[in-house]
């Protein structure tokens, strides 16, 4: 395609036409088209991640509209994934968008994971987070995970190289599965925006350097404090530890 659309981005030293082509040819799987999925998918598209597949089985409700800015009142009752595909296709016709109006379950992810270069976890429940992690760990697929609650957010990127950790190393599931999904709590839209756009930046970072150390970033949108931790493999981890 004509890369003129990306002219401003291509002025950045880290970008080149070859790198932009690499992004355009990459395949991204986005699981969840809700509060984090909206900024995530829009900024993936505008950055030129050229082939995006979305899974979300939810329909749009009036209570979503404040933070899920891709949807408007007339979309209520429609599937989020379908409306997202329609709107992104209009705005960014150079991006191939595929939508599935269903939740992505474990068996399906096993079947399709090898088709993708990046997996984005924008779900709102721990069950999904863990099976997504387990399968990405098994197939060594880069996983970029985002979560938000109230005014706080977390973005984690995992590449599963050599001694790199997995999600379970950081958040052992026994402790997390009892927690409420974020959907049941309050959340402020700005933190969803930060998390979604930071996930895009994480994917760019992994594209610049596939061996980059895995990092967890915590964002506090109330104090504006952002902190980072290098995360390490837990040798006792049930998923990726020494068996
Ligand atoms: Zn692990």
Image (tube, helix red, strand yellow):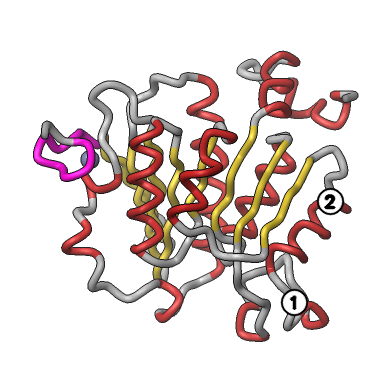
Residue 175 sits in quarter: bottom left
Residue farthest bottom in this picture: 62
- Residue at 47% of width from left, 19% of height from top? 209
Residue numbers of the magenta segment: 231-240
Which residue was labeled with disc 2? 89
Left or right: 102 in relation to 3: left
- Residue at 61% of width from left, 40% of height from top? 28
> What secondary structure is marked by label 1?
loop
Separation of residues labelled 1 and 2 (CA atoms) = 17 Å
- Residue at 39% of width from left, 19% of height from top? 211
Q: Is residue 132 magenta?
A: no
Q: Nearer the viewer, residue 21 or 39?
A: 21
Quarter of the image with the N terminus is top right
Q: Position of residue 154 (x, y in %)?
A: 38, 53
Left or right: 61 in relation to 103: right
Q: Are marks 1 and 2 in contact (CB under 8 Å)?
A: no
Which residue was labeled with disc 1? 78
Q: Position of residue 69 (x, y in %)?
A: 69, 68
Q: Is residue 93 shown above or below 122?
A: above
Q: Position of residue 121 (x, y in %)?
A: 48, 52
Precedes in sequence: disc 1 or disc 2: 1
Give the quarter the ligand 1 occupies.
top left
Quarter of the image with the C terminus is top left
Mark 1 crowdedness (10 Å alpha carbons): few <14, some 14-19, many ≥20: some
């Amino acid at each position: 395609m004509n890369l003129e659309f990306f002219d401003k981005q291509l002025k950045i030293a880290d970008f080149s036409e070859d790198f932009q082509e690499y992004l355009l040819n990459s395949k991204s799987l986005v699981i969840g088209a809700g509060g984090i999925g909206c900024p995530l998918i829009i900024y993936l598209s505008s950055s030129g991640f050229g082939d995006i597949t979305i899974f979300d089985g939810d329909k749009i409700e009036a209570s979503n509209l404040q933070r899920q800015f891709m949807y408007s009142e007339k979309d209520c009752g429609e599937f989020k994934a379908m409306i997202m595909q329609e709107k992104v296709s209009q705005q960014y016709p150079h991006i191939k968008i595929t939508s599935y109006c269903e939740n992505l379950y474990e068996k399906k992810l096993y079947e399709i994971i090898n088709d993708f270069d990046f997996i984005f976890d924008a779900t709102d429940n721990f069950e999904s987070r863990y099976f997504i992690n387990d399968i990405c760990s098994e197939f060594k697929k880069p996983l970029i995970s985002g979560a938000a609650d109230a005014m706080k957010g977390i973005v984690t990127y995992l590449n599963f190289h050599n001694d790199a950790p997995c999600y379970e190393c950081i958040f052992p599931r026994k402790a997390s599965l009892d927690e409420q999904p974020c959907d049941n709590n309050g959340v402020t839209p700005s933190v969803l925006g930060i998390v979604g756009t930071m996930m895009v930046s994480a994917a760019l970072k992994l594209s610049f350097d596939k061996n980059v150390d895995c990092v967890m970033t915590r964002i506090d949108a109330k104090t504006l404090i952002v902190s980072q931790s290098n995360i390490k493999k837990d040798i006792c981890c049930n998923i990726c530890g020494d068996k």
